[in-house]
Image (tube, rainbow, N blue to C red):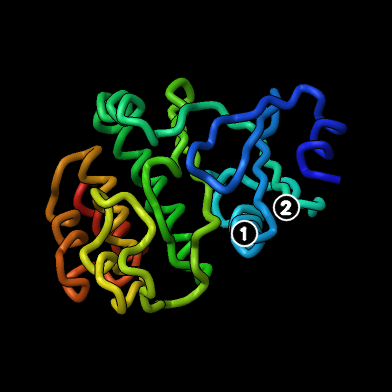
Amino acid sequence: MLAEDWLKERLPSLTPLDKQDSATRAWRTESLFVKFFPYALQERAAVEAEISSAGLHSSIVPSLLMTGCDDGMVLAYPWVQGITLGTPEAREKFYALPELEKRLAIDTLVDVCAAITEAGWLLVDLYEGNLIYDFEQKHLWCFDWDLCVKAESYVLEMERNWGSSRLMAPEEFVQGATIDQRTNVFNIARIAQLALGDSEALTRATAPNPENRFATVREQQVAIRAQIS
């Protein structure tokens, strides 16, 4: 049975969500978010399921189900309140929040990323579209990990890495460059700079030379917390 038919049989209130320029598809119900990966992307589905179901952090949207259909893999998650920060309008609303509220949200982001990297993963294509902010409850949710790589480092085989160019480290534009946690330190710090402005810790985290950045995401978090405490 095809995934969409399998879902409609079980979830009659299923509503499709627009995912332009994407090989995956998504739907929602009142209580669920459902994502489909064609079999050509089943390795990515497995990565997403492993990270989101591992209980690494309470702010990671947890996967509830992964199942195979004739045309691919289906993953289901609880529908969480809030809006993704992937659009300029949503980011501007987030940037306008009180400073302390933004700092707490960014600290949650760094904590989530530290938990994932400590579990042996490297983040790929981390950007604000991975973030859902609940403006009423003042809570940050993080999701969408299918491009992550389980390794301490890897060599970039593409001409440029996946990602938003305004958040990417210099080495992500160099084929053959080494990608490791110091690259993730840069990505996270760029999100933080746009929300909070620059600081000594964030300047170090975004140093052009990876050797001059924090070695790990957790080390980055400790430095940021010390600076704003």
Left or right, 227 with respect to 159, comes to: left
Please provide percent x and percent y for residue 39: 69, 58
Q: Height in image: 14 above or below 19?
A: above
Q: Height in image: 25 above or below 170?
A: above
Q: Height in image: 223 above or below 209?
A: above
Q: Height in image: 24 above or below 149?
A: above
Three-letter amino acid code at the position of disc 2: Met
Q: Which residue is mark 1?
A: 41
Cα separation between marks 2 and 1: 9 Å
Residue 73, disc: 2
- The secondary element bearing badge 1 is classed as helix
Please provide percent x and percent y for residue 34: 68, 39
- Asked whether the viewer can see residue 202, the reply is yes
Give the residue at x 52% y 45%.
Answer: 22
Three-letter amino acid code at the position of disc 1: Leu
122, 35: nearer the viewer: 35
